[in-house]
Image: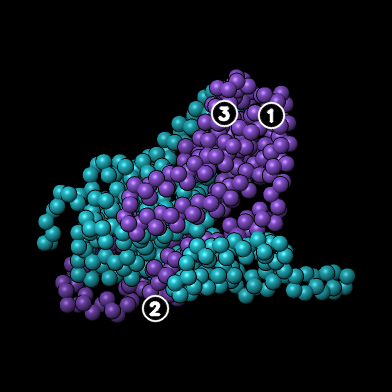
Chain colours: A purple, B cyan
Amino acid sequence: MSVIQIILVFIWSSITGAGSVLDEFQTHRPLIACSVMGIILGDPAKGLILGGTLELIALGWMNIGAAQSPDSALASTIATILVIIGGQDIQKGIAIALPVAAAGQVLTVFARTITVIFQHAAVKMAEEAKFNKIIALHFSALFVQALRVSIPTTIVAIFVSPDMVKTMLNALPAVVTGGLTVAGGFIVVVGYAMILNMMSVKYLMPFFYLGFVLGGYLKLSLLAFGVVGLVFAIIYVQLNPKFSLPNLKNNANGSKNLNQESELADDELED
Amino acid sequence: MTTVKDEKTDLTKKDIMQTFIFENFQQASFNYETIHGLAFCVDMIPTIRRVYKTKDEQVKALKRHLVFFNTTPAVCGPIVGVTMALEKGKASGEDIDESTIQSLKVGLMGPLAGVGDPLMWGTLRPILAALGASLALSGSWFGPLIFFLAFNGVRLSLKWYGLQIGLNRGLGLVKDISGNLLPKLTEGASVLGLFIMGVLVNKWTTINIPLVISKTTVAGKTTITTLQNILDELCPGLPALGLTVLMMYLLRKKVNPIILIFALFAVGIIGYGFGILK
């Protein structure tokens, strides 16, 4: 592989790494990641076929809520190198891609842990109202994610050895990677607690517990829960005697219309 | 009624455009503590810069938006738009308090994710990807091209129009604020926000404690009861609630959130090591 190719591999795998966390432009999906890798490595046709094959396997890999999916970016870039440069067939490429995707998921856990530091640095900058520094911190976190894919990919591109990647990842003690994955499942409670402390009105906290209990027992979609919550909110406001008093003093009709409008506006935002 | 329209605090086209561009990097600083927290703050920076003139107000606004936020990136537009309008209203002297803004954000983010996740990840992407992949397998470059263009076309229009709708509705909302509508909105938003937060604590937190409590063998059939089984029978998700309430208490006691995060990571690693957590 030429030096230019290695540089291009580094750049493209950085883009897929960033794309993988952003989940916006979909450059991390095999269909795109493998195809472009194929062009860089000089065998576009093979890259395209590998991309199509891997995409069908990865159809269900998606980020839902705070959880993350197997890493299609790392899987795509490394599999394409091994198929085109390493001379493996497509099936072998797929067989390699799957464990690499799982390994990439572990690296994602690390990257998303490291970015907690960026969040806290931003809070410090907020104390001084340093707008540009906050924006810079937000975007530098993206580099962590880019390097997460481009470093292992470039190493594989230079040595074309999947075993090396495996050995490197195996060097991490399982208790740390497993522990971080476990902690990744509940570390958000700190975030929940912060926002709850900010929102919390003591006499309204029963609604929080109600949401919690219903969330545990009802298999509703979040949209349905949103509707239930909205209904609770409207009923609460309508029945609350605190609000009916000034209503009588004011022009009753006028304020009534306003309320209806606001509720309508709320409704439409939900859709 | 008395507010004079101040040109300098009106959001410009450039501000809105900049917000729209930032919105395309909603997960750049994805982190386990606040998910899109930093990103939401960055989304709000063009607005905060425009509407708040004193440093004290700017600091408060920035910190207000550096908290937990999470939704499907493609549908963050309406929430960002409404929040921009509320901040503008607050800056121009409307009596909008912090908890109203937070509650509206939370009240909207859960339900919008409820629409966005199945729509984007469960429907649009698999359909377009399957179509693209089958074209790619027949050797056609239209495969990746159609997938890329169609998906991003839908995604960008959702973001753009979502932002516009949110902003316009929000501005309308702020304009209508008079008499006792605002306290009603505040209370209603709090009820909705707290309710959704309760649902999210349960649905978006994963704690599994496979610690074996008892092993009983009845007629050759062994039943293993784990701590998780017992807790689930009490109420599903109880450890998540306990942990959240504990964190709320510690934060109110002024414990540094960084320490809490490291402590939780330590709990994860130690718990996993001893096989208590999985």
Amino acid type shown at disc 1:
Val
The chain letter for the residue carrying disc 1 is: A
Please give the residue where the numbered disc 3 appears in the rendered image. A9
Answer with left or right where residue A230 lies relative to residue B122. left
Q: Residue A143's spot in the image, x, y percent?
A: 49, 41
Would residue B198 be visible to someone looking at this image?
yes
Q: Residues within 10 Å of mark 3 (few under 14, many from 20)?
A: many
- Depth check: give the residue in front, B124 or A26: A26
The residue sitting at 44% across, 36% down in the picture is B152
Please give the residue where the numbered disc 1 appears in the rendered image. A160
Answer with left or right where residue A207 lies relative to residue A86. left
Q: Quadrant of residue B131?
A: top right
Q: Earlier in the sequence, mark 2 or mark 1?
A: 1
- Depth check: give the residue in front, B267 or A52: B267
The chain letter for the residue carrying disc 2 is: A
Q: Which circle, 2 or 1, is nearer the viewer? A: 1
The residue sitting at 32% across, 73% down in the picture is A238
Tell me the distance, in whole angstroms, between the alpha carbons under discs 3 and 1: 13 Å
Tell me the distance, in whole angstroms, between the alpha carbons under discs 2 and 3: 57 Å
Q: Residue A123's spot in the image, x, y percent?
A: 40, 58
Work out which quarter of the rendered image holds the N terminus of chain A and state it.
top right
Q: Residues within 10 Å of mark 2 (few under 14, many from 20)?
A: few
Amino acid type shown at disc 2:
Tyr
The residue sitting at 52% across, 31% down in the picture is A11
Q: Earlier in the sequence, mark 2 or mark 3?
A: 3
Please give the residue where the numbered disc 2 appears in the rendered image. A203
Q: Which circle, 2 or 3, is nearer the viewer? A: 3
Would residue B78 be visible to someone looking at this image?
no
